[in-house]
Amino acid sequence: MKSSMSPLPADIPSRLSTAIAFLCAATTITTAAAPQSNSGAMPSQPNIVLIIADDIGYGDLGYMGCEAIDTPNIDRLAELGVECTDAYMTAPQCAPARAAVLTGIYQQRFGYERIAPAHTNGGLPEDREIIPEYLHSAGYISGMVGKWHLGYLESQHPLNRGFDDLYGFIHGSHDYYVTNPNAPVTSYRAPLQDGSEKVIFNGYLTDDLAQAAVDFITTNKDKPFFLYAPFNAPHTPHHTPPEQYMDRIGKTSSTKRAEHLAMIVALDDAVGRIVETLEQEGIAENTLIIFTNDNGGVSNKEVASNGVLRGGKGMLFEGGIRVPWIFYWPGTLSPHTYSQPITGVDIAPTILDLAAVPIPADMDGVSLWPSIANGAPLDRKYLYWRFKFRGRVQGAVRKGDWKYYMVDRDVEPSRYGEIKPGEYLFNLGDDISERRDLAQKNPEIFQELQAAYRAWDSELADPAWPSD
Ligand SMILES: [Ca+2]
């Protein structure tokens, strides 16, 4: 098991330094007590709330070092829960990352390499089961609030994919203000749906989704439930959030960044309302909350900040795939920092494990429960990535602190820092910003990871639809 936090460059924000100092202190304390479940046994069929933000930058939350906003509700989950420092999604883009989360399988195995344009009929294949379908057999009620983005066909609709309840939208983004169900459908203006009904809403979307999450919890408080809450904040469009959010932004470099951060403040309030509802209903101690983000922030618009990480959305540098990730379960999970590398395909098997549903053998992910609850080392050698998008292939493998990265075409220098087509080796332990290529100095580990990538790559399907 590696140290509790990866070393960071000297220029990390002072607030993050403070947070790390606190977390290191906390880790020291909890190491003595050993991170573990209080009961020592796996709790039976807890409620599970999975909150996934959309395009938050790695440095855009209070506890991750953002100085321009406070995110007290998310920060509280990190402080009192399990803060995962080396957590990833399996794609640097919304939909493929979500496909892996819900199936527990690397999405490239079934051709979900990239987002599916609406005209392609692409999306979740019918023969790949997803979390709510598995949970039905264990008596769970499942609800979804937010952004689907996993197919436009009726057969791919959330209500036909195991969800008993839906409040949200099918496309990849949505207006933050009023929509009319009779208006022409565009990517931003597909109607909001309450179950199978198209609805008008007149408020602010993040507030509206928070209310739907609260209503789902209140309605289903007496059953084991799974609430999948993929909020679309702070994804585009950059509609200026209401004053109550804009007024809480400190100094920023641009109006667009202020709007981006205000969307995150609204999301933080939504998280607070969900936690408050669980507490008011007396079920907080029987509910696991997972909070994470679907891919890194867009790094070319001076909107999101990925902190010390290189690159952003669309890239397999850390800035595109490394995400904030928290497990919060008061009374069951002791607060601690968790630094083993984990990734999006681990979410489904972890949830199934807690629900006492057998984990299918074809899942790539592993249940994290024994590890986050009792400190067991994960039995896994490599994490993998591949992203074929708009004519460029990127690949990556992580083992311990080592990361192999390959790209077959020039990467736009202004966007990610100059990098030429080739294969690289980075050591994230002392170079989290991926600036020093160590391939020549470490041929053995380079060749091992290169071979691991090529073997895994050979198992994958071709992308099932073209890039848009
Ligand atoms: Ca996204």
Image: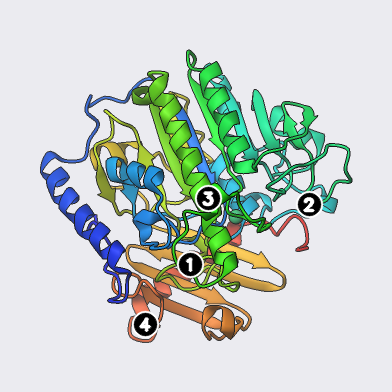
Q: Residues within 10 Å of mark 2 (few under 14, many from 20)?
A: some
- Which residue has dot 3 on it? 245
Q: Residue at x 74, y 43 (%)?
A: 151
Instruction: Say whether disc 1 or disc 2 marks the residue closer to the N-terminus.
Output: 2
Residue 355 in the image, given as x and y percentages of width and height: 44, 25
Split into 4 quadrants, where in the image is the N terminus? bottom left
Closer to the camera, 359 or 114?
A: 114
- Which residue has dot 1 on it? 305
Residue 46 in the image, given as x and y percentages of width and height: 41, 23
Q: Is residue 80 left or right of residue 179?
A: left
Residue 308 in the image, given as x and y percentages of width and height: 39, 71
Give the distance between the C-alpha atoms of the residues marked 1 and 4, in whole angstroms. Answer: 26 Å
Whether tag 1 and tag 2 are in contact, CB under 8 A, the answer is no
Residue 309 in the image, given as x and y percentages of width and height: 43, 70
Instruction: Say whether disc 2 or disc 4 marks the residue closer to the N-terminus.
Output: 2
- Which residue has dot 2 on it? 187
Amino acid type at circle 3 is Tyr
Q: How many marks?
A: 4
SS class, disc 3: helix
Q: Judge depth for marks 2 and 4 and give the one in front.
A: 2
Q: Judge depth for marks 1 and 3 and give the one in front.
A: 3
Q: Residue at x 54, y 82 (%)?
A: 422
Q: Is residue 177 above or below residue 272?
A: below
Whether tag 1 and tag 4 are in contact, CB under 8 A, the answer is no
Instruction: Say whether disc 1 or disc 4 marks the residue closer to the N-terminus.
Output: 1
Amino acid type at circle 4 is Leu
Give the distance between the C-alpha atoms of the residues marked 1 and 2, in whole angstroms. Answer: 25 Å
Q: Quadrant of residue 92?
A: bottom right
- Which residue has dot 4 on it? 438
Amino acid type at circle 1 is Ser
Q: Residues within 10 Å of mark 3 (few under 14, many from 20)?
A: many
SS class, disc 1: loop
